Image: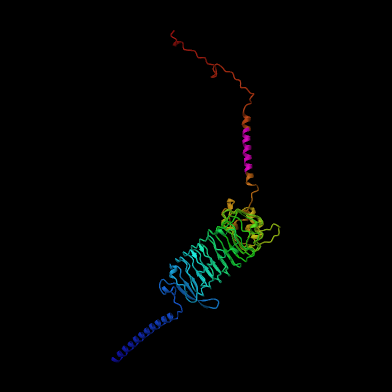
Amino acid sequence: MTKPLTLTMTKRSHFALSWIAICVLLLVSSSQSELIDANDEDVDRFCYPAAHKNSRLSCECSNVSASPWGMRALHIDCSYKDFQAEDLTALLPLYIDTLDLSWNKLNRAPAFNSDSLRMLNLMHNNISTISASNFAAIVSLKELYLGWNSIQLLEPQAFAGLPHLQVLNLAHNNLHALPAQIFAPLLVLQTLELSWNRQLNQTNGLELYGTYGINPKLNALRLDACGLSELKLPIDAPLRELSLRRNLFVRVPSQLPRQLERLDISENLLEKLLPVDAANLSQLQQLYVEDMPQLEGIAAHAFAQLHQVQAMSFQNCRRLSWLDGDAFIPAEGNVTLPPLRTLSFRGTMLRNFNVSLSPVFGKLTQLDLNGVPLHCDCQLVWLKDLAIQTNGRCLRPARIRGMLVSSVRRDEFSCERWPRWAYGLIILALIALCAAGVYLIVMGLRPHRGVTMRRKVGAGSPYARVTIEPNRQENFH
């Protein structure tokens, strides 16, 4: 009995020792793997600024492979850290590619030093001035975002030393005037954003490219909400995109680049679109005329010169009530339809569309008529034949009010034979005839003026003469 008991105890002890050994090995391997991971990190996760490295106040750094050759690049995110300019070091880490300092408390633009930084985001801070040569030590910079600050002053040569900058965003600041040739050092600038500098109307009447040294090969220019009423741009400039929303234009500027492909003239003061507005825009592909507070109509031949237009939007023009049927047809009569594919009249007051627009509407892939008070009469029945869904609903006649145009039967698109004013005249004439008939009947029943009624008055008649004598009994004499 002793041998089996001893053998059992020995097996149990071996089993327990083996489990202990396995646990120890697992713990050692996990600790070694943590050390390997920590040592293999070429860049610490929290690497900048140096004074707060690897602390809660440091920025988050991520090491990625940059295109096109997969070279090492460092992205640093310092947003929402409440940093001030004094908290940041001028020398940036090696291999840095992008630096995001948005939503901080910077009162000035830091002067960084790096030969690899390509994108710098300083949006949503309290910067008021950009000093001369502020970014001269980051010569490889390609994108600079300075929007949503309080910048009032750009010193001359503020952007000196940035020969590779392609995108410059100065939107939502307090710029009143720009120094002459301020953008001249930006030799390859492609996109310039100056929107929402409400007092920038001092540039009215000036030729922007020549005055401020804008790159002649600029691709996109945005001047929304700058208080502009005049604008002059080089006709031969290769500008592709121009945004002029929320300004004070009463006509589309006449001096615009011929190669323009996208124009946004929304929220301006135009009352009517005329042929002169699009006379020099033969290469335009997208036209946005939205939220116009005073636009009432589109004249004949207004879009005759838009030979390449593919998308047009008149959304939320609340006073737009008429569209001429010849708006897309040249005055000469040569019917050359544009390759229009997208058209929006959402939220306008258009009630009907002339049948002469059917060739243009028939080529559309998208037609938005949401909120348009359509009068579904016989003149609009052709709209039902379109192959696309317009989401347009009928306002009149009352029997089909609120129904989709596509769901209304063809026989419901009926026209009144007489205009409404004719029915009113007929009713008034009938009333007048009835009144005249009643008058004649009454006059016919009345006796003639020459007829005299003679009747004898007897003694017992109530019309007989009555003589009143005094009561003799009352005379005491």
> Residue furthest toward the top?
477
Q: In front here: 30 or 142? A: 142
Left or right of residue 12, residue 239 in this image: right
Q: How is the image coloured?
A: rainbow
How far across and how far down the image is residue 431, in percent? 62, 39
Q: In front here: 424 or 135? A: 135
How far across and how far down the image is residue 133, in percent? 52, 69
Q: In front here: 280 or 461? A: 280
> Residue furthest toward the left?
2
How far across and how far down the image is residue 270, in percent? 60, 55
Q: Which residues fall within the magenta stretch?
A: 424-439
The N terminus: image quadrant: bottom left
Residue at image position (63%, 32%) is 441
Q: Is residue 430 visible?
A: yes
Q: Is residue 146 above or below residue 294?
A: below
Majority secondary structure of the magenta segment? helix
Q: Is residue 214 magenta?
A: no
Q: Is residue 375 visible?
A: no
Residue at image position (63%, 25%) is 449
Picture quadrant where residue 332 is located: bottom right
Q: In front here: 370 or 174? A: 174
Q: Is residue 411 above or below residue 55?
A: above
Picture quadrant where residue 446 is located: top right
**Count of marks overlaid on the render:** 0
How far across and how far down the image is residue 208, in percent? 59, 62
The C terminus: image quadrant: top left
> Residue furthest toward the bottom?
3
